[in-house]
Image: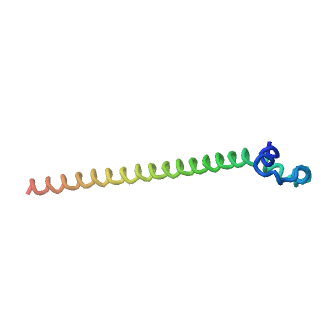
Amino acid sequence: MVLSVCFKQKPSCDKLALERFYKDMPIWLKAAGKWGSIFAILALVVTLLKQIIGFIAFLTTAVKLLVVVVFAALFLGIAFMVFRSFSQRRKAQE
């Protein structure tokens, strides 16, 4: 298919030279030509999944930290209300 496109566009292409190039092409270049796009897509999907997992871990940590901060604020608020009620009782008794 590549050869036919080459000959349609450029009549000066040497058919034997192109066939020799594809025949003697290194194996890693052939693999990149046939399977390179599939491997690139797989690598992108794996990278995307890693990033999504990392983002979910970050959100989980943020939610845990928020729960701890809210609990501490609630605990301090209740403690403040208890001490204020004790002080108001003392003032009321005096």
- Give the left or right position of residue 23, taking residue 4 as reference: right
Quarter in which the N terminus is drawn: top right
> How far from the left and from the top, in percent, is residue 42?
69, 45
Q: Is residue 57 left or right of residue 23?
A: left
Residue 25 horizontal/vertical position (percent): 88, 54
Residue 18 position in % (x across, y down) = 87, 52
Quarter in which the C terminus is drawn: bottom left
At a point 68% along the width and 46% down the height, the residue shown is: 41
Front-most of residues 18 and 56: 18
Q: Quadrant of residue 69?
A: bottom left
- Residue located farthest toward the front when viewing the structure as drawn: 11
Q: Residue at x 75, y 49 (%)?
A: 9
Residue 33 placed where, x, y %?
A: 79, 49
Q: Residue at x 87, y 53 (%)?
A: 14
Front in this rendered view, residue 1 or 44: 1
Q: How many marks can you see? A: 0
